[in-house]
Image (cartoon, rainbow, N blue to C red):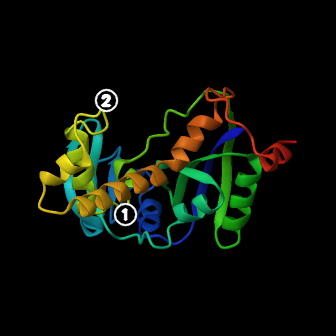
Amino acid sequence: MSLYEASIRVKHECPYRGISERHPDLTIREWPLSDCQVLEITAEMTPTDELLDEISRIGTVLHESDDDDGYHVVTQSCLCSLEESIIDRFEEHNCLYQSPTIYRQGWEHYTVVAFGGDDIRELLGDLRADRDIELLSKTSISEKQIPHSMLAPANQLFENVTDRQLAALQLALESGYYEQPRNTSLRELADKTTVARSTYEEHLRKAENKLLTNAGQLLRLVTATSTADPLGVRKTPQAEQAGD
């Protein structure tokens, strides 16, 4: 299986497009979280009052500095809706998004990892249907080489895991449940809580299931770069036919 890293730039209506067009020396880097975005905004020049006013309307300022290295600000924003995010369309075409998104001069720059050239072509065809898009680069990733930018944000790994499920998972981990041999049992773990054993076990199993499901794409990426089969997994007849 061949892996590719592709860099594309897209132009469509987004609250950050306007500000990057009006201020050409501005660079905005966006890290999407589950319910907001963290933005790092940098400029080489001293910001004008107009720019400062626009930045103040983006969201909550977490950090700000203006020195010889230029202007630098970090904000937390909820302007761009994540419900119809372009990132969802990447995943529909088997492409893994790598943060951050970079906004500059009215363009959004994205980097994705795809499991085949066809996935990239289909993604580009889909996006061209409703927006301007350019493929800046497409690089083949050699075997056993994982892109340095392929970092999984913690919020993605724990997406849809409830507070109770997280608490059950943390208690099991800190109590040595996942060590070999195990240092505790489900009954002993449940006795440390105010819930029944069956309830605790349900929270724990659901947390494990969601965590592994969320990590599935990253697991697939890692195994796809290796030609070795350390377990000697037997192929089903259907899998053997698919590989012919």
Residue at the spot of label 1: 160
- Return the residue nearer the eye: 97 or 72: 97
Question: Could you say which quadrant of the image residue 2 lies in?
Answer: top right
Q: Quadrant of the N terminus?
A: top right
Please provide percent x and percent y for residue 113: 60, 45
> Residue, x 67% and y 43% (percent of image)?
137
Residue at the spot of label 2: 181
Q: Quadrant of the C terminus?
A: top right
> Residue, x 75% and y 55% (percent of image)?
121
In the rendered structure, which disc, 1 or 2, sits on the residue that comes first in sequence?
Answer: 1
Please provide percent x and percent y for residue 49: 24, 62
Q: Residues within 10 Å of mark 1 (few under 14, many from 20)?
A: some
SS type, badge 2: loop
**Relative vertical location of residue 84 with respect to residue 104 in this rendering, above or below:** below
Q: Find the distance from the CA under tag 1 to the CA under tag 2.
A: 30 Å
Left or right of residue 198, residue 212 in this image:
right
Left or right of residue 20, residue 196 in this image:
left
> Residue, x 33% and y 66% (percent of image)?
35
Q: Amino acid at mark 1?
A: Asn
Question: Could you say which quadrant of the image residue 65 lies in?
Answer: top left
Q: Amino acid at mark 2?
A: Pro
Please provide percent x and percent y for residue 58: 30, 66
- How many numbered circles does the render carry? 2
SS type, badge 1: loop
- Return the residue nearer the eye: 8 or 205: 205
